[in-house]
Amino acid sequence: MLGILQGAPVARLLVVAGLLASLTACDPSTPGSECSTSAECTGGTCIDGECVPAVDAGGSDAGGERDAGGGVDSGPPPDTGPVCEPTESPEVTCNLIDDDCNGRVDDVDVAGDGFCDCLTIGVLGGPGSLASSTFQAWLEDRGTATTRFGTDPAEELTADALATFDIVIVDNLPREYTAAEAATLRAFVDEGGGLIVMTGHNGGTDRPRANTLLAELGASYDEGLINGPADTWATHPISEGVASVTFLGGYHVTAPSGVDVAQVAGRSVGMALELDMGRAFVWGDEWIQYDSEWSAMPMIAQLWSNLVNWVGPRDRCMVLL
């Protein structure tokens, strides 16, 4: 090689000398060898400006960063934690632990009614104009913790308030809401919360109040009251076992990204939405909570059961009949 270099210009000599120096400096067996590309690392690879030995040299690879090939490595090994040892069978404690080791966390259903007993449900706003004690008792009888909140118009809708619930049911709202509050509700659903919205309380202020909260979800109630019954249902988990329920003085629902589940007079009155990690159902009326309808229409209880199970958590509190 020295013979080839004889008579070479000084610039060429300097380049070759630099190349020899870089090959020496980028030996992966020498800790701290600097590099800019893997081509500079003899028998190794360039990671974060340093020549390191290649771990393998196989085909496709999805492994760690200090790796130049494929082989069988694909990141961390399978779960090596302790083997699950059942402490309850069936599970009866709501503690965010898979106590019976069946792969489902908090699948507590003491009554065997297909309804998770570990849910926390918040009802936003005041009750409607008619009695709804049967509906309230039905929720509580399922073993859930149910709390009404946000009845004071001065009370701000915050992330902290929503974080205490698995599911929020929107009832008779006391006021219109800010864009920031609507974004907070949307974030609650995006992060895995369940949302069920009702309206139709007075045919006036109830619609814009609800619409201010629905704006961030891409849904709204259309102006103009309509009457049912709601007897046209699409095939959906929400509609299983439901053929007709009361719909009196409610609104059509618009939600371009939603699934049209129920209709009155050819237009949607119930839209199901999946938003990131959570789910929402927007219903155009409020009569499905009143005692008069609960006593006359058993399908209303079936509808609520479907709703709570569909919008509820998907990473825990899932009950399989």
Image (cartoon, rainbow, N blue to C red):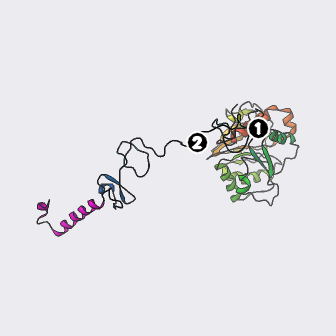
Quadrant hosting residue 232: top right
Which residue, as the protein is rendered here, is positioned at the far bottom? 10
Residue 55 position, x and y percent, is: 37, 48
Asked if residue 22 is among those painted magenta in the image, a careful observer would answer yes
Quadrant hosting residue 21: bottom left
Q: Amino acid at mark 2?
A: Pro
On the picture, is 120 further left or further right than 80? Answer: right
First to last magenta residue range: 1-25
Asked if residue 104 is among those painted magenta in the image, a careful observer would answer no
Q: Which residue is mark 2?
A: 82
CA separation in Å, label 1 and label 2:
39 Å
Q: Secondary structure at mark 1?
A: helix
Residue 242 position, x and y percent, is: 75, 31
Labels 1 and 2: the sequence-earlier one: 2
On the picture, is 274 further left or further right than 292? Answer: left
> Would you say residue 265 is visible in this rendering?
no
Q: Amino acid at mark 1?
A: Trp
Q: Which mark is residue 304?
A: 1
Point out the frontmost of discs 1 and 2: 2
Placement of the N terminus among the 4 image quadrants: bottom left
Residue 171 position, x and y percent, is: 79, 48
Residue drawn where x is 78% and y is 33% of the image: 111
Residue 48 position, x and y percent, is: 40, 59
